[in-house]
Amino acid sequence: MTGLTAAAPPAPAAVSAAVLPYQDPALPVPQRVEDLLGRMTLDDKLGQMTQVEKDALVPQSDLAAYRIGSVLSGGDSTVSPNNAQTWADTYDALQRTALATPLGIPMIYGIDAVHGHNAVRGATLFPHNIGLGATRDPALVQRVGRAVAEEVAGTGIDWSFAPCLCVARNDRWGRTYESFGETPELPSAMTSFITGMQGDTLGADPASVLTTAKHYLGDGGTTGGVDQGNTEISEAELRAVHLPPFKEAIRRGVGSVMLSYSSWNGVRSHANRYLVTDMLKGELGFTGFVVSDWAAVDQLDGQTGFTGAEIATAVNAGVDMVMVPHDYKKFLTLLRGEVSAGRVPLARIDDANRRILTKKFQLGLFERPLTDRSYTATVGSAAHRTLARQAVRASQVLLKNDGGILPLPKNGKLFVAGKSADDIGNQSGGWTVGWQGRSGAVTEGTTVLQGIRAAVADPSRVTYDRYGNGIDGSYGAAVAVVGETPYAEMRGDRPGSMGLDQEDLQTLARLKASGVPVVVVLVSGRPLDIAAQLPDWKALLAAWLPGTEGAGVADVLFGDFSPFGRLPMTWMRDASQQPVNDGDGKTPLFRYGYGLTYDSDPVPDPDPDPSPAKACTATYKLVNSWPGGHQAEVTVKNTGTGPITGWSVDWDLGGTSVTSLWNGTHTVTDGHVTVRNTASNGSLAASAATSFGYTASGTAGTPAPRCTPA
């Protein structure tokens, strides 16, 4: 490497000349890869396996000198001024440096665009995954993925470390909001995000962005919900609960997989050859490349600083690209030593390079290495903000609505309080213009309070005080927007209390003392312990972490959009229940899949203790199927010992159009079908022909009907 450092970077390769086979876009990608691989030195190959933090490249010419294959921006890495134009300029400068090598191999640039292009001030920020999971709408999530891809591509960046496909099984975990849901079926359905970002074929259009299925494997199942902890479960449970979303991601052609910091039964994922090489690459047939998490290889021996043994262990386990992210010179020296000593076979190095180079060719980086500025203006565009507002509406879960207080009248006198009512940082959460996020006006958008004022007939009839001071009995309702403040991995774990903080409790006490009906909007990255306070509230709306478009919350509060979100997580009755999940026999406050809407029968008690006298079942039968759709029959039966006033069953239709024939009363809404029967016993059958939005190879998707006694 010393000789490389001293060498002056040559002129960029003339890609357009296509004088060499790997430079010819008309040739098949495998042929181009093999031609290029045959021309690469060992230094070229080791550099391709190295990913370096942008700010660690000092001088920038080291990118070419050390043949670095990938650059990333960590959670707190930024540019100045922080806008889309500067990001694009920064990317292009780095890419031109990468091209200044004898072979002109472009770099690939990675970033955590986990709920929008969240490192960029002014970008559109969508609900975090927990909110998208509540929508039960894979088609909408695919559209979100496409919008995020356009904004990422508009800054030149071609690789996003998303989506997180973790199945969060303990809400104490600080990354719960990065999970689409607690059952494998929900994150699996939401892999539609991958298709949105990459397109049906990677690189088919200039806005195609490489995605990352993370974190492989089992990070949502650690004991105690401890971040980077130990998942102590059988292989059967690992395969049944945590593996299915990754299978579906691979079916969709996900380009990369990031390993988890966590361990499975004491063995770290980055050292687990069985999980990475045998299962992921062998059994599941993953042909993309595996990337480590931030400095995770350096954690393998528990000591700070790379060792050759750590590097050999990880690479031999199946890691193709190492997120170093800082000490790249030492890393490359040690990796070269392990290869020279035979402890890392050259065949393993070549395999890693084939995987990485294949994705670079498929993305079109050799032909289009620089930013497509036609997408730069999409960052924070009106069209994307409109889509984000739609996603916010669809993510709201109405958990309580006593007396039908919601929707609120637009001509009423309203009091608004709470620390998150007028705080775009709180409503966006972690990974927002910084790793951990922060409270305050961190980026552009609309707060919930601004959305409320824009929705009412007369904004002067809306009074706001963060702490609830000044309220009296003259108001028709008080809206309290309370919950968690921003956090991300490591700092977000809640091993103790999971309730509201003292400020929230005091604000709510002031509102309650006024005698005004209280509507709570809960802004949080997970279910919270609120059972003790719930009787004081007339309504409860779980808003999750909606992102920059708080007006979507107001749309639901005032009835411009009926809430149809359903819980992606079981809601604990108290923190001592954790972990609590669907089907575990525990009695939660709100079950997985629960959610009211404005046209549903009132449910005054969110979760009475189960009684044999109030029980019903819903069965699903596939009647007919064809490419892109199917016909199904749902039968609802009263299985209790006594009469019930009715029951309902609903299932997700992916937000598509519905053609229905019903025997009984029914309602059809965007994304859901609800069937009801008010008899005390009997059955009700229904059939629907529709495209479900997540069919595979002409095989109909299988929704899970849920029956709830009314």
Image: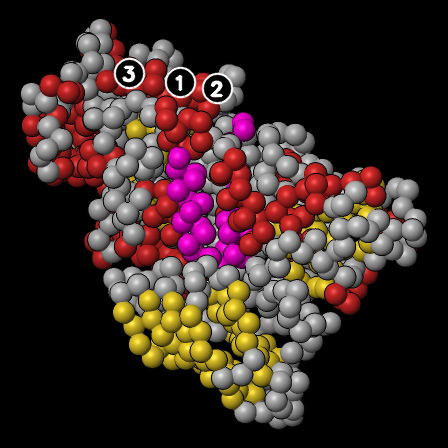
**Label drawn at residue 96:** 3
Q: Is residue 427 above or below residue 594?
A: above
User: Where's the N terminus, which quadrant?
Assistant: top left
Do callouts 1 and 2 mark residues in contact (Cβ within 8 Å)? yes
Q: Position of residue 333 (x, y in %)?
A: 26, 22
Could you tell me if residue 352 is visible in this image?
no
Q: Residue at x 19, y 9 (%)?
A: 10
Tell whether 520 sits left or right of 666: right
Residue 406 appears in the picture as rendered? yes
Residue shown at 70% from the left, 72% from the top? 602
Specify whether 706 is left or right of 142: right
Q: Residues within 10 Å of mark 1 (few under 14, many from 20)?
A: some
Give the SS element for disc 3: helix
Q: Three-letter amino acid code at disc 1?
A: Thr
Question: Magenta: predominant secondary structure element?
Answer: helix
- The amino acid on which the numbered mark 3 sits, given as a three-letter code, is Arg
Give the percent coordinates (x, y) of residue 157.
37, 29
Q: Amino acid at mark 2?
A: Val
User: Label 3 vs label 1: CA separation?
Assistant: 10 Å
Q: Where's residue 168, x and y in %? A: 50, 55
Whether residue 614 appears in magenta in the rendering, the answer is no
> Which residue in the structure is indicated by mark 2?
79
Mark positioned earlier in the residue sequence (3 or 2)? 2
Q: Please, what secondary structure does the residue beneath circle 1 have?
A: helix
Q: Residues within 10 Å of mark 2 (few under 14, many from 20)?
A: some
Q: Which residues are magenta?
A: 121-150
Q: Nearer the viewer, residue 266 or 506?
A: 506
| Separation of residues labelled 1 and 2 (CA atoms) | 8 Å
Q: Quadrant of the C terminus?
A: bottom right
Quadrant in the rendering for residue 700? bottom left
Q: Residue at x 61, y 55 (%)?
A: 561
Q: Of 230 and 409, which appears nearest the observer? A: 409
